Image (tube, grey):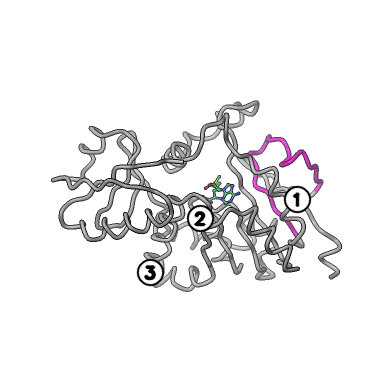
Amino acid sequence: MVSELRLYTEAEWLTQAQHYSAVLLSRGVQTCIETVEKLNARFLRLNPELALCVDAEGLWLCANGMKMQPDWKAEVGRLKRASLKSEMIARACNLSEKPSLIDATAGLGHDSLLMAHLGAQVTLLERHPILFTLLEDAKRQAADDPFLASVVARIQLVFTDSADYLRNCAAQGKVVDVVYLDPMFPQRDQHQQAQKKQAQVKKQMQLLHLLLPEDGEMDLGDHLLGLAQQIAKRVVVKRPRLAVFLAGQETTHQWQGDACRFDAYFQANLNNG
Ligand SMILES: C[S@@+](CC[C@H](N)C(=O)[O-])C[C@H]1O[C@@H](n2cnc3c(N)ncnc32)[C@H](O)[C@@H]1O
């Protein structure tokens, strides 16, 4: 976990920067605010270390001359083109039934935004304090967008470790229609060939990988599958196309795409319950 980060801003956005800094501190992340004259591409190139910045568009993660935020508004075009028929994730998660769905690995929240757009009632879980704060900001901004407002009204964000959250649900006897899992997957692995076929990993994902632990200590989320199966009628796991099964647990229910696949696990006991 990052202990102290620089948070760059211009004088104009200092109050907002102080607000984000306080929110991050309440989540265990210490930031050091630095007011700079021009927070532009040149500045970011000259300051390539991992940091945060605040400008007119809110909070950003920056590194290596790039900056990123979940930017749900930029997803509107994709959402408008999406349909229950065209999206593999919609079939895997049975979104036509407007399910109650827990996305236990939020990341940038893009999968959940799509699933909420296609009808799911989403509880979105993220344990990383910086990512969670970025998501919160993305949701706040999306709520002001005429197209996204009704979509994000179906998304509830929770800052938690999913293992704890799922355990609590199980203890309370809670049942949901779907738990969706998309844990991190090592970039350099036995499936490198499949990775190479993809276009360059998106800028956003590059920065996400900088923020999260490196391969050696990466939590691959195997333990989440069994916990999810205790409370969900259907667990759907997103994997790179050729990746091993999560927790080594095979399934024959798969939806295969070019770059990724969705593995589904059905709990007959919960379906009948
Ligand atoms: C590959 S990203 C998910 C990407 C996401 N599907 C999207 O559309 O942007 C995985 C995310 O899950 C989060 N995560 C992994 N294990 C978790 C856990 N036990 N509890 C909460 N979040 C977790 C990581 O912090 C990371 O942000």
Q: Quadrant of the C terminus?
A: bottom right
Judge depth for marks 1 and 2 and give the one in front.
Answer: 1
Does residue 53 appear left or right of residue 72 in this picture?
Answer: left
State the residue lying farthest toward the left.
Answer: 37
Q: Separation of disc 3 and disc 2 at Cα?
A: 17 Å
Q: Amino acid at mark 1?
A: Gly
Image: magenta residue range: 234-252
Q: Amino acid at mark 2?
A: Gly
Q: Residue 230 magenta-drawn?
A: no
Q: Residue at x 21, y 38 (%)?
A: 43
Res. 76 image quadrant: bottom left
- Helix or strand or loop: what does disc 2 sit on? loop
Q: Which residue is mark 1?
A: 226
Q: Residue at x 79, y 50 (%)?
A: 253
Calculate the distance from the C-alpha at mark 1 to the C-alpha at mark 2: 23 Å
Q: Residue at x 26, y 57 (%)?
A: 18
- Residue 143, by quadrant, is bottom left
Label 2 residue near ligand 1, CB within 8 Å? yes
For badge 3, the amino acid type reads: Asp
- Residue denoted by label 2: 109
Q: Is residue 235 magenta?
A: yes
In depth, the one of 263 and 23 nearer the eye is: 23
Q: Give the vertical position of 152 relative to 191 (above or below).
A: below
* Mark 3 surroundings within 10 Å by alpha-carbon count, few (fewer than 14), some (14 through 19), many (20 or more): some
Q: Determine if the C-beta at disc 3 is less than 8 A from ligand 1.
A: no
CA distance separating discs 1 and 3? 38 Å
